[in-house]
């Protein structure tokens, strides 16, 4: 696949929708030069979200063990097995995702996965760089999430982490015929090799 045809999958999460930030975030992707190939507003199901997060028992145990270690260091009671603490992380993320509509999108362009991930920013909004979507539009943090015992950081956007993950993720949310191939005029200035298609 040519780098200019790379695609990435993005979800604008319920907090983005509820805070009327859809246009602001889409504008960020469009200004860079990415082409929107698919979009739809959906109410996610629990099944879709569990498939989307795609974690196995090893992941649950690893994360749960880390939680138990923190609890031990603070003298807090251990109330369940490591695997259940690990599953609580995804349970919190699923509950967050299914609380309201989300906007699913496919974006296309040169190294779309890496660049859109950079535009979105780090997972925790509090420590995301200024200038990123999460850094500019959210004030949530792991500490606040843990203090409120809500299990998930409200960080506005999901985007594909690795090129290899795109096909799996997009298949959960879109049918192939919902993703549109079309020519965008701005592609002439972004990708035309000789720039000979501009002047008449």
Image (spheres, grey):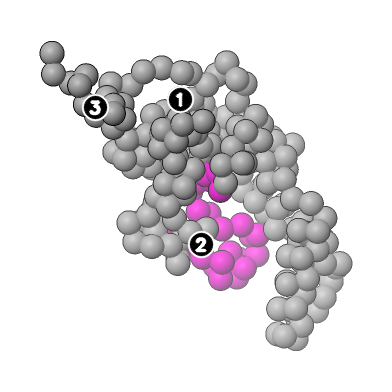
Region in magenta: 138-161
Circle 1 residues within 10 Å: few <14, some 14–19, many ≥20: some
Residue 44 placement (x, y as % from top left)? 64, 34
Task: Give the secondary structure at mark 2.
Answer: loop
Residue 11 lies, with reference to residue 185, above or below; the image says below
Residue 103 lies, with reference to residue 116, above or below; the image says above
User: Looking at the image, which residue is at 65% across and 59% down?
Assistant: 151
User: Looking at the image, which residue is at 80% across and 79% down?
Assistant: 77
User: Looking at the image, which residue is at 41% across and 17% down?
Assistant: 182
Whether residue 149 appears in magenta in the rendering, the answer is yes
Whether residue 72 appears in magenta in the rendering, the answer is no
- Name the foreground residue: 166 vs 90: 166
- Name the foreground residue: 172 vs 145: 172
Task: Give the secondary structure at mark 3.
Answer: loop
Q: Which quarter of the picture shows residue 29?
A: top left
Circle 2 residues within 10 Å: few <14, some 14–19, many ≥20: some
* Residue at which label 1 appears: 37
* Residue at which label 3 appears: 194
Task: Give the secondary structure at mark 1.
Answer: strand
Residue pushed farthest right?
81
* Residue at which label 2 appears: 124
Whether residue 155 sits left or right of residue 62 in the image: it is: left
Q: What is the distance, in whole Å, between disc 1 and disc 3 at their CAs?
A: 25 Å
Return the disc, 1 or 3, that comes first in the chain's sequence: 1
Looking at the rendered image, the disc whose residue lies closer to the viewer, 2 or 1, is 1
Residue 102 placement (x, y as % from top left)? 54, 36
């Amino acid at each position: 696949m040519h780098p200019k045809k790379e695609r990435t999958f993005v979800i604008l999460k319920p907090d983005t929708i509820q805070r009327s930030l859809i246009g602001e975030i889409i504008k960020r992707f469009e200004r860079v030069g990415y082409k929107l190939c698919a979009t739809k507003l959906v109410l996610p199901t629990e099944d879709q979200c569990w498939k989307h997060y795609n974690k196995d028992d090893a992941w649950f145990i690893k994360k749960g063990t880390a939680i138990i270690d923190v609890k031990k260091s603070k003298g807090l009671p251990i109330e369940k097995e490591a695997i259940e603490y690990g599953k609580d992380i995804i349970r919190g993320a699923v509950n967050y995702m299914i609380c309201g509509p989300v906007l699913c999108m496919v974006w296309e362009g040169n190294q779309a996965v890496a660049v859109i991930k950079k535009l979105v920013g780090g997972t925790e909004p509090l420590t995301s760089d200024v200038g990123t979507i999460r850094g500019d539009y959210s004030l949530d943090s792991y500490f606040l999430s843990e203090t409120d015992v809500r299990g998930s950081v409200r960080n506005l956007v999901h985007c594909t982490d690795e090129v290899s993950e795109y096909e799996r993720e997009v298949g959960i949310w879109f049918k192939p015929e919902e993703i549109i191939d079309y020519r965008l005029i701005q592609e002439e200035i972004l990708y035309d090799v000789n720039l000979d298609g501009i002047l008449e």
